[in-house]
Amino acid sequence: MKYLNKKSKKYIISILMLMFSSVFLTGCSAKEFADKFYDNIIKEQRYKYILEGLGNTFVITIFAGLIGVFLGFILAVIRVTHDKKGSFKISNLFVKLYLTIIRGTPVMVQLIIIYYVIFASVNINKMFVAVIAFGLNSAAYVAEIIRSGIMSIDIGQFEAGHSLGLKYTSVMIHIILPQALKNVLPALANEFITLLKETSISGYIGLNDLTRGGMIIRSITYEAMFPLLLVALIYLVLVVGLSSLVSRLERRLKKNER
Amino acid sequence: MKDNIILYTEHLKKAYGDEVVLDDINIEIKKGEVIAVIGPSGCGKSTFIRTLNLLEKPTGGNIYFDDICITDKKTKIYDVLPKMGMVFQQFNLFNNMTIEKNITFAPIKHKIMTEEEAKQRAKELLERVGLSDKQDAYPSQLSGGQKQRIAIARALAMNPDIILFDEPTSALDPEMVNEVLNIMKELARGGMTMVVVTHEIGFAREVASRVIFIDEKKIMEDGTPKEVLDNPKSERLKSFLDSVI
């Protein structure tokens, strides 16, 4: 334990606690626990449901995250440019409407509408639908994060650029955005973590993600506790791991400033 | 360019909504002049200097620079602005760039210089402002006075025809004011055309070739330092000078 930092210690302790509590909740002895573990995870290679689901969860999160950052970035720049220069009037209106709708409705509703309404008549890959749905959803939140980052940059940076005869676009690309992105990197990483957890509703369109993997095992073994707690444990490990990466990132960014 | 006039305004007006800040400003600035702009706070002197390079869009009147009407919508201001430098109260160095990059970025972007030339020029300028050792530092590692000296170097890198100073020493600790003023004095001696909004009456007296007093939205007095500072005509200027000194 000596070599671990505080964060990782907390992380290991929480996992151990969850394991103990799962044993306690199932109310069984170590022998029974081992049997259940075998029935739910090992037997007939049931762990494959979990692994396949975990893979899909990863793929959805990563690609939706990429779409979210890319699209969110564009939306943010449109909003800011409108606020600062008065251009993009129509686009800004659409962006505002988009943000209102996406942020005003549950992501689950958006997912099932995209699958059952928009892509109803075509036979389409569920993974593709999930990536699109979560990507579009995430973009709205990313847009607001990046916009707040740009707004936090001192107006003097724009003015100095103007005074040197630099065009708005090149001030934005070379001066404002690098500073803004650095400021919001931790917030973006947190959005990515949220996205990872949100993908757990992919089962609603019949997609085998991590959560649904647990549910499938449950339906085979009639044992809810074991597979579902395992699923929770995997999410927890991922999120805590990512969070500790984020805080490490934050610390490093702070160090660079001084 | 008639009579060596590099920049002039015609009936320049600036208002924020209904509130008029500057009204009917007519001024001619000749090459090589060092103009100190003084006035009580809130009188519009900062707004005045900021309208000259269109950081504030004038609501009326025209500004001519090098005989080009820069308030004309057809004028490509980004071709004109590089010739007008500006130094800000808050320095406004680009925080994400090293000192060298701060100085070389705009000249390279405008293709005024190649990267090699720009770096060479930055080296010379850093020597001139006495900060040769800081070329790889970031703005956050410098003191206020050092930042302002870099900001002056950055403006000089564009080889401007005129430099506008918006209260360049107001945000500095007292012991750093002189290091910046000294560089400005040197610039003035070198024949640079300068417009300086300042509270440093001593600086205005010593360096400026002309002093302008702005109050009540207008240029109230305009003349040599002797005329304006030593023989103020208006009561407003008298009471202003009394309160400053």
Image (tube, coloured by chain):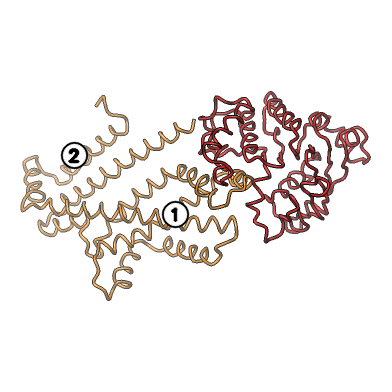
Q: How many marks?
A: 2
Disc with the residue nearer the chain's start (2 vs 1): 2
- Name the amino acid type tagged 2: Phe
Q: Colour of chain A?
A: orange
- Is B227 situated left or right of A101 in this image? right
> For the point 91% across and 36% down, which residue is it?
B227
Q: Classify mark 2: residues with Cα within 10 Å, few (<14), some (14-19) or many (20+).
A: few
- The residue tagged with tag 2: helix, strand or loop? helix
- Is A83 situated left or right of A34 in this image? right
Pinpoint residue B228: horizontal percent, then vertical percent.
Answer: 89, 37
User: Which residue is the site of mark 1?
Assistant: A73
Which of B224 and A197 lies nearest the eye of the viewer? Answer: B224
Which of A199 and A216 lies nearest the eye of the viewer? Answer: A199
> For the point 29% across and 68% down, which residue is it?
A115
Quadrant of residue B173 within the rendered picture: top right
Q: Classify mark 1: residues with Cα within 10 Å, few (<14), some (14-19) or many (20+).
A: many
Give the number of the disc on residue A123: none
- Is B135 situated left or right of A245 in this image? right
Give the number of the disc on residue A20: 2
- Name the amino acid type tagged 1: Phe
- The residue tagged with tag 1: helix, strand or loop? helix
Among the chains pictured, the one given red colouring is B
Cα distance between the residues tagged 2 and 1? 44 Å
